[in-house]
């Protein structure tokens, strides 16, 4: 994997295209950024649309192209403020002399300049214009002003120009721009890795209206998915029913029952480096699922026969080319003893034990406190938010993954 791919993995790049002949290269740039692992949203100025159609960039980016500031429909979808917040980097390629002038003046007279005013992300320009326009005192003054305001300049390159002139003003090539953009970011600790995380409860149907389940909210698993994606991992979240929003940059697969979670996990795990089982999976399911709603009878008690569900995390750990496999242990007593037993029985690389008997830190709470248990010993992480804990767990797991031979086997 190239350095660009590591640094741009999961980065969100807003590509601004302004009206210059080099706009045709923006199509290739979209692809190259995506090849490096970035998500790309494209914003075009009206002049850019004279050189290349929004449809081309929409087809390549896989996202609708944004063109209008004063379009109620677009604002209702991803409006200029949302786009400004979404971006990890605003890259404008090509950036014309006119655009540089408007940016230097702080104008917000179209969608792209408004985004530039609103964003907290770094802004990088790849200038592209005739060499005379580049040398013009006004352009040079604008350049100086933009550099002073920490706008980053990629290029321009020197050479033959579309108009026949020779000199500075050529846009850098797409691959050079990808490398330059990658240079702005440090690679995440899980860049280049694929992670599969199970989260939430499962529901085991009794009849069309009833099921067996538990109190898992999914918060712990979703926080881990979010932290993994932030760390640059290609993150797949296999989720039971929850009320939570999918974290940014995470691919979510929805399942209901343990059997469905097992199938989705077995399909995803062979290609992953790290598998984390944070879901609260029902150990048993009703032997029969009634096709019609069960009616109350004369009996004072009835018996529900349950059969064992497949053990998902143990099945992953038993794969011949297994990922680094991490399970949780949800316990109400003898936390460490039970966690150690699970480590051995399920043949896991690591168990994260949590006391679900404490309402502050178990199911559906915002906080958690855990103890990591593996064959080398234990490590306790005291109570903190699940978001904070997830970031620390991901940092620890990234370190273990680097040292562990299982991560090599997954490749
Ligand atoms: O979702 P939240 O509300 O945020 O709560 C978080 C949590 C308490 C659910 C979470 O931190 C947690 O402990 N998840 C594991 C819950 C659980 O089912 O633990 P267990 O000790 O019963 O299972 C041990 C491990 O085997 C777990 O990794 C579990 O996902 C896995 N398992 C269990 C049964 C099964 N059939 N297949 C499995 O993979």
Image: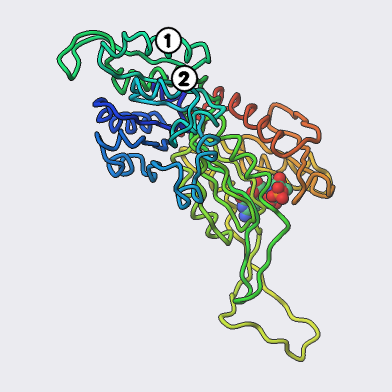
Q: Quadrant of the C terminus?
A: top left
Residue lying farthest to the left in this orientation:
164
Q: Nearer the viewer, residue 9 or 330?
A: 9
- What numbered label is drawn on residue 205? none
Of 30 and 117, nearer the camera is 117
Quadrant of the image containing the N terminus:
top left
Residue at the far bottom in the pictured view = 298
Mark 1 secondary-structure assignment: helix
Q: Relative to 154, say whether 366 is above or below.
A: below
**Snapshot quadrant of residue 361:** top right
In which quarter of the view is residue 389 placed?
top right
Whole-number angstrom distance, CA of label 1 to CA of label 2 = 9 Å
Tell whether 405 sits left or right of 93. right
**Residue nearest the viewer, comparing 50 with 7:** 50
Can residue 411 be seen by looking at this rendering? no
Q: Position of residue 230 (x, y in %)?
A: 57, 32
Disc 1 Cβ-to-ligand 1 distance below 8 Å: no
Residue drawn at x 28%, y 9% is 168
Of callouts 1 and 2, the N-terminal one: 2
Asked if the residue under mark 2 is in contact with the one under mark 1, i.e. CB atoms within 8 Å, the reply is yes
- Report whether 385 appears left or right of 168: right
What residue is disc 1 on?
Answer: 141
Disc tally is 2
Question: Ligand 1 within 8 A of label 2's CB?
Answer: no
Q: Which residue is mark 2?
A: 104
Image location of residue 241, percent across then percent down: 61, 58
């Amino acid at each position: 994997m190239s350095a660009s791919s590591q640094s741009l993995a999961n980065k969100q790049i807003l590509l601004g295209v302004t009206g210059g002949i080099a706009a045709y290269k923006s199509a290739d740039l979209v692809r190259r950024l995506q090849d490096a692992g970035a998500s790309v949203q494209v914003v075009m100025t009206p002049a850019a649309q004279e050189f290349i159609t929004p449809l081309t960039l929409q087809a390549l980016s896989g996202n609708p192209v944004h063109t209008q500031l004063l379009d109620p429909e677009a604002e209702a979808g991803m409006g200029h403020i949302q786009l400004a917040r979404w971006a990890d980097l605003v890259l404008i390629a090509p950036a014309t002399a006119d655009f540089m002038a408007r940016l230097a003046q702080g104008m917000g007279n179209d969608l792209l300049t408004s985004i530039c005013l609103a964003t907290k992300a770094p802004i990088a320009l790849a200038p592209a214009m005739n060499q005379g326009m580049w040398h013009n005192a006004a352009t040079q003054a604008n350049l100086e002003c933009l550099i002073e305001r920490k706008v980053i300049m990629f290029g321009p390159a020197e050479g033959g120009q579309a108009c026949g002139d020779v000199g500075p003003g050529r846009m850098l090539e797409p691959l050079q721009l990808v490398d330059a953009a990658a240079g702005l970011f440090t690679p995440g600790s899980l860049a280049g890795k694929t992670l599969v995380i199970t989260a939430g409860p499962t529901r085991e149907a009794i009849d069309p209206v009833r099921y067996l389940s538990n109190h898992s909210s999914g918060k712990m698993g979703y926080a881990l998915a979010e932290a993994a994606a932030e760390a640059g991992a290609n993150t797949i979240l296999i989720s039971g029913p929850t009320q939570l929003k999918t974290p940014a940059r995470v691919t979510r697969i929805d399942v209901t029952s343990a059997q469905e979670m097992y199938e989705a996990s077995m399909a995803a795990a062979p290609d992953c480096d790290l598998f984390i089982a944070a879901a609260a999976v029902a150990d048993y399911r009703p032997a029969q699922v009634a096709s019609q709603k069960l009616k109350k009878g004369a009996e004072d008690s009835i018996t529900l026969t349950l059969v064992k569900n497949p053990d998902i995390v143990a099945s992953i750990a038993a794969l011949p080319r297994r990922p680094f496999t991490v399970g949780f242990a949800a316990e109400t007593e003898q936390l460490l003893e039970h966690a150690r037993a699970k480590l051995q029985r399920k043949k896991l690389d690591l168990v994260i034990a949590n006391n679900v008997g404490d309402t502050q830190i178990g199911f559906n709470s915002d906080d958690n406190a855990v103890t990591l248990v593996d064959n080398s010993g234990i490590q306790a992480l005291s109570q903190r938010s699940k978001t904070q804990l997830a970031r620390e767990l991901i940092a620890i797991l990234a370190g273990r993954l680097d040292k562990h031979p299982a991560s090599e086997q997954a490749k």
